[in-house]
């Protein structure tokens, strides 16, 4: 019940979302080191690296802060985030948030199964519907710092779900994603990842 109450408050915007106002132009100038993996416009070409384009600035800020603090771990990203100050983080986040996400498509054989889980969950296994936090159209919830998943690379989404399930990633609010992913089968993980890629 406590987790639900906190989530509702955040969804209503009762919790602040940003530590500093971001300057997208300054962020673009600082993004030179980001484009090698994430692309000049935030649309990475490698499907194991996330698209940052169109993600909310609040979510991007949280991830960079978590990488810097060690709450979220990745050898490359932790090193990239370490020298960033609060204003750098805000500026980079503002820049990538203003970019448009490139179109994608999911594996047609898995999309229907993924849509069922995304929209309705799995009552038998207790998997919550993804749309509850990420929205019916996959655009996320910036006030709650829940990411947009629409158009994200399927390989990246599947890896994150597996990481939440295994406990390798644990920077989710109150363990919400870890709890959901723990109940997902590998088939559901693959299907949901393909569905959101083509949203």
Image: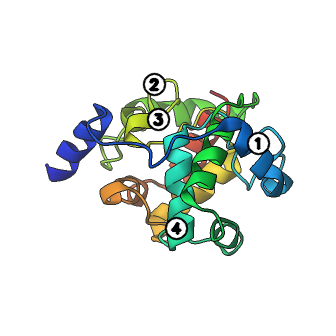
Determine which residue is flagged by label 3.
118
Q: Secondary structure at mark 2?
A: loop
Q: Compared with residue 124, is residue 119 higher up or lower down, i.e. above or below? A: above
- Could you give the CA–CA distance between mark 1 and mark 3, rounded to whole angstroms? 33 Å
Q: Closer to the camera: disc 4 or disc 3?
A: 4
Asked which secondary structure carries label 4, the reply is loop
Q: CA distance from mark 1 to mark 4?
A: 24 Å
Q: Earlier in the sequence, mark 4 or mark 2?
A: 4
Q: Position of residue 34 (x, y in %)?
A: 78, 54
Q: Quadrant of residue 112?
A: top right
Q: Residue at x 81, y 55 (%)?
A: 37
Residue at position x 46%, y 63% from top?
A: 165
The answer to whether residue 82 is seen in the rendering is yes
| Circle 1 or circle 3, nearest the eye | 1
Residues marked 1 and 3 touching at CB (< 8 Å): no
Q: Which mark, by number, is residue 108?
A: none
Q: Residue beneath label 2, please?
A: 136
User: Which numbered marker is on residue 72?
Assistant: 4
Q: Nearer the viewer, residue 24 or 144?
A: 24
Q: Which residue is mark 1?
A: 28
Between 156 and 81, the residue placed more toward the observer is 81
């Amino acid at each position: 019940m406590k987790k639900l109450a906190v989530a509702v408050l955040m969804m209503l915007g009762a919790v602040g979302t940003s530590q500093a106002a971001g300057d997208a132009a300054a962020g673009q100038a600082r993004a030179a080191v980001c484009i090698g993996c994430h692309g000049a416009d935030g649309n990475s070409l490698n499907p194991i690296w996330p698209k940052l384009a169109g993600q909310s600035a609040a979510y991007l800020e949280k991830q960079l802060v978590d990488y810097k603090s060690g709450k979220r771990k990745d050898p490359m990203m932790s090193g990239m985030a370490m020298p960033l100050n609060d204003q750098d983080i805000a500026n980079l986040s503002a820049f990538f948030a203003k970019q448009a996400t490139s179109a994608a498509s999911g594996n047609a054989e898995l999309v229907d199964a993924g849509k069922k889980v995304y929209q309705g969950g799995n009552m038998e296994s207790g998997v919550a519907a993804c749309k509850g936090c990420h929205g019916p159209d996959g655009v996320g919830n910036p006030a709650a710092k829940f990411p947009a998943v629409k158009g994200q690379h399927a390989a990246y989404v599947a890896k994150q779900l597996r990481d939440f399930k295994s406990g390798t990633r644990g920077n989710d609010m109150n363990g919400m994603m870890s709890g959901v992913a723990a109940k997902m089968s590998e088939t559901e993980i693959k299907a949901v990842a393909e569905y959101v890629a083509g949203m």
